[in-house]
Image (cartoon, rainbow, N blue to C red):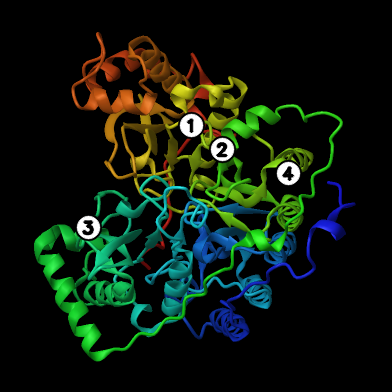
Amino acid sequence: MSKTSLSQSRPDNLPKPKIQWGRLEEADKFAEMVKLLRQGKITRDEMRRFRLQHGAYGSRMTDDYSMVRIKIPAGEVYPEQLEKIADLSESFSIGSAHVSTRQNFQLHWITLEDVSEVMRGLAEIGLTSREACGNSVRNVMCSPLAGVCSEEVFDPTPHALATAKFLLRNAMNQSLPRKFKLNFTCCEKHGMARIVDVGLIPQRMEINGNMENGFKVFLGGGLGAQSFVGHQLEPFTPEADLLYTVIAVIRIYDRMGNRENMARNRMRYLVNELGWEKFQSVILKERAMVKLVQSVVVKLDLDKTPEVLRKVSISSEMSSSPQGLSRWLKTNTVKQKQHGYSSAFVTLESGDITASQLRAVAEMAREFSAEGRIRNGFAQDIVFRWVKDEDLPRLYAALLEVGLANPGALTMASVVGCSGTTSCNLALTNSHRLAKEVQRKFLEMKLDEDDDLRDSTIKISGCPNSCGQHEIATIGFYGGGGRLGKDMYPLYTMLLGGRADEKSMLGLSTIKVPAKRVIPAILKVIEIFKSEKRSGETLDKWIHNVIEGNGGPKVKSINDIKDLLKPVVAPPTIEQDSDFYVDYGNDGSYHARTGRGECAA
């Protein structure tokens, strides 16, 4: 990318990380614990609980290698932090990083002895892995469009960061019954407030003649083997009651959550078992008590409008528009509420990004973003915000140089896939690789340019646990195993009709689809839709119309779709098609062997 204009267009005092999330002494403690483990002075179970609290999962079939999850509160990442993650990935991991659906970065296959060095490197640039795993409050998420969304009533980012800062290392959430998740969203459209333990959407309400900031607070949502949509706590939760509410919910969950049954110890089960009205009453009473005995003072760090940072565009005349620019502009950019600026989404294949690409993104953040940083998104993507509209062609050209200019980021072609059998102990299928195969096929077919498919999503998990968020996808899949005679093959259950907006609903289980028939099955659904759709119907709307009994002339119900898919998903014998019995990304025959899960260790 050209740097000739940087000295004139970019100030030297670009923003630096404001919050030091990391602590060097925690790296020293981790190294000490590994030493005690190797000396036989602590057990592997004791080490497991410790490393999970510090953000290190065991890798598939071994705990001598770890996945280190880097906590990224509100998804905000600064250039020097991206460069450090790149360095760490090359020195201790596999030369790439992974962006999760919860805005974290993950580094895979790190030897247990090297985890402390990774933690040390992170702390040096203000990051931490503390409580990114284990039975604690996980990364506090915030919509990547918060602050620039045209439909938000105010920017919740300062509240998300303040909440994350208050909860990190807080004694009250070090040993919860299970993991606990909070999501802040900018508006109803750009977030997942109803499918987490605590979801928050900004709103304003007139109180005693004055307009006050506050939130819609949703409790008890979550995805997994059994999923639930959250309930709204009250019509309006004032800004001043935000942390008191969060504290009350965590305290009740800590006291009443199920510590005996690992399969039912998430907060959503507690809400379901008590019933919403009783749970709501308990929370409101607990909040009143907390307000009487605890004083919470939070300073919100309100950013100045980034527009003041740079008045001059870096753009200059280009000899010609780069190939694919118009397609990328249509499918990867969003106009901000601030005139003349856009946010650009970078779609990654299953969230993967190489070290060299991380360094390039860091430099692009310095060069093109008026706020001098990026945000990780909710769909394993990266977002450049505050990009001047006239600079978008140059940003695209820079992304093109490093292999990050794939179109389709905001369309059905951007497929979410969890890590699957590439690293996870519980996975039954290679959902990670399948998501890449689907994305590549859809981009090859230019389905990202089809407006009928734009508002639909595809999400894939390698097991019934919803790390890939399959239950809130227009078309979702979770992995399992199938058998024809004595021969096993990788298999997925297809769900239809999930969504996470104001009309949140969980997808309906439809049909079993062999891994090697997932792409033909999706294309068949699209074909059926095209033959049945009414004027103005998108795929997402059509599927919901079918679910509600308002389908087209031939397809009246989900069962009709199932019947039409049966010929597509019928398994051949191993003699007819041996490749059918091999999972994506694997060479040998398929098996359904799993290891010990660590989500509740």
Query: Between residues 416 and 78, which one lies in front from this camera angle?
Result: 78
Q: What type is the residue that disc 4 sits on?
A: Asp
Q: What type is the residue that disc 1 sits on?
A: Met
Question: In the figure, 541 relative to 30: above or below?
Answer: above
Task: Name the residue that disc number 2 marks.
Answer: 409
Task: Name the residue that disc number 1 marks.
Answer: 412
Question: In the figure, 122 relative to 503: above or below?
Answer: below
**Sequence-wise first label, 3 or 2:** 3
The CA distance from mark 3 to mark 4 is: 41 Å
Do the numbered discs 4 and 1 sit on residues whose CB atoms are within 8 Å? no
The CA distance from mark 3 to mark 2 is: 31 Å
Task: Name the residue that disc number 4 marks.
Answer: 391
Q: What type is the residue that disc 2 sits on?
A: Ala
Q: Quick check: 560 left or right of 315?
A: left
Res. 46 visible in picture: no
- The label nearer to you, 3 versus 1, is 3
Task: Name the residue that disc number 3 marks.
Answer: 232
SS for dot 4: helix
Query: Between residues 528 and 288, which one lies in front from this camera angle?
Result: 288
Place of residue 465 in the rendered image (x, y in percent of width and height, measured from the top left) = 36, 49
Do the numbered discs 3 and 2 sit on residues whose CB atoms are within 8 Å? no
Place of residue 159 in the rendered image (x, y in percent of width and height, measured from the top left) = 43, 69
